[in-house]
Amino acid sequence: MVSDVCIAGGGPAGLAAALALRQQGFAVTVVDCAVPPIDKACGEGLMPDSLAALRRLGVELDSSIGYPFRGISFSDGSSTVRGEFPNGSGLGVRRFQLHELLVKHVEAAGVQTIWGAKNVHLCEGGLSIQGTHLAARFVVGADGLKSAIRASAGLDAVKSEKRRYGFRRHYRVAPWSDYVELYWGPRGQFYITPIAKSEICIVFISRDSKLRLDAALEEFPLLRQKLAGADHSSHEMGSMSISRSLRRIYKDGVALLGDASGSVDAITGEGMCLAFKQAEAFAHALRSGDLKQYAAHHKKFSAKPRRMASLMLTMEWHGEIQRRALASLAKRPELFDALLKLHVGEATMAGLLSRHLVGFGLDFLTA
C-alpha cells in the first residue's frame, strides 16, 4: 500500500496533520517510535484558539476531560495582574489524555498508524522502518525539536535560536484559581495550570538546565506555601523550551510541521495552537499543490508569538525592568487585557499603542 502522505511523528502535531490531511481526502500513515499514550513535559494549558483549531479538525474538548480556565495571571510576589480571554475559556488537559483522544480520532478517520517503529529513516519515496520500505508520495516531519527527518532532508539550517529548560510535575491539590498563573522570579518563571478538580500542573522554566523544581520553589515562598502538604501525582519530567526559526520548512517531497519546523518559547502558551494551525494550512497547501502557501502561513502564524515572547523575556534578563513592568501593569489592568487580546489575535498593535502605552510608560518610569 502506498500512502499519499507518511507522517514521521505521532504526537499532537503529527496527529493533527493526519486529521487535516484526511479532511482533504489524502491517504495517511503515521509512524512513531513510541507507543500511546505519549506524555511530554509541557504546561498542559490549551488556549481558546487551540480549542477552536481542534474543533475545525473535528476534535471537541470540554471540561469532562480537563479543567477550564478563564485567563492569565502574572505575579512577582509584590504585584499581581490578571486578564480574561476575549474569545472563550482555555482548558487544562493532561498531555497523555489529549494524546489518547487524538489517537482515537485519527483511527476513526481511517489513518493507518504504526507505533513502536524502530530505526525510522527518510529514504527515496517514503520512509524506511527497520530496513522495510514504507512508500509515500510525500513525507511530513513532525518528530519534534530534535527532528531526524529535518536533518536527513537538509532542512536544519537555523536563522535564530534561543534555549531555556523546563521541568514539570503534578500535585494533588484543588486549583486555587481559574487562571493560568505565571509567577516571575529572578531566575525563571513558574506556570500553574489547573487540570482537574483536585490536580494542578506546575512547570518551571529558566535558562539554567540544573535549576530543578524543588530548588526553584525556594525562591517563590508564596507558591511554596500554597503547595505545602500537597502530594505529587507525577514524577518530575524535563524538556527544552526552544525559540527556533528555520530558513526553510519544505524541500523535495518533505515538509516540516510542529516543533520540527521551528518553535516559540513556552512562555507564549502557543506551541500547540501553532501546530494545529500549521496542520490545517499544510493540508490545504498540499491539496492546492503550492507549498509556498504553507511557508507563508507558517511564518504569519509564528510572528506574533515570537514578538510576544521577546517582549516578555526581556523582563527575565532585567530584574528591575520586571519589577517596574509588573507594578505598572497592576496599575493598568486594562493594558494587560489589551495585551491578552493582542496575543490571541483579537486586537492590533496600532490600537494598543494609541490607547495604552503612553500611560504605561509614565507609570513604568515612576514605579
Image: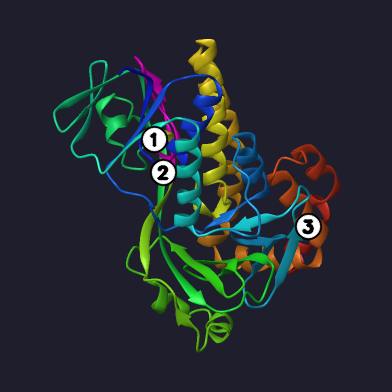
Q: Which residues are magenta?
A: 243-260
Neighbour class for label 1 at 10 Å: few (<14), some, many (≥20)?
A: many
Q: How many marks?
A: 3
Residue drawn 44% across the image and 62% down it:
206
Q: Is residue 9 above or below residue 248?
A: below
Q: Position of residue 278 (x, y in %)?
A: 53, 31
- Among the 4 quarters of the image, the one containing residue 126: top left
Observer-side mark, 1 or 2, equals: 2
The tag earlier along the polypeptide, 1 or 3, is: 1
Is label 1 in contact with label 3 (beta carbons under 8 Å)? no
The front one of 349 and 134 is 134
Q: The N terminus lies in which quarter of the figure?
A: top left
Q: CA distance from mark 1 to mark 3?
A: 41 Å
Identity of the amino acid at label 1? Ala
Q: Position of residue 189 (x, y in %)?
A: 52, 66
Is label 1 in contact with label 2 (beta carbons under 8 Å)? yes
Q: Position of residue 366 (x, y in %)?
A: 76, 67
Residue drawn 49% across the image and 79% down it:
219
Neighbour class for label 3 at 10 Å: few (<14), some, many (≥20)?
A: some
Element at label 1: loop
Observer-side mark, 2 or 3, equals: 2
* 116 drawn magenta: no
Identity of the amino acid at label 2? Gly
Q: Is residue 81 above or below residue 120?
A: below
Q: Which residue is mark 1?
A: 142
Q: Which residue is mark 3?
A: 360
Q: Which residue is mark 2?
A: 11
Element at label 3: helix
Identity of the amino acid at label 3? Phe
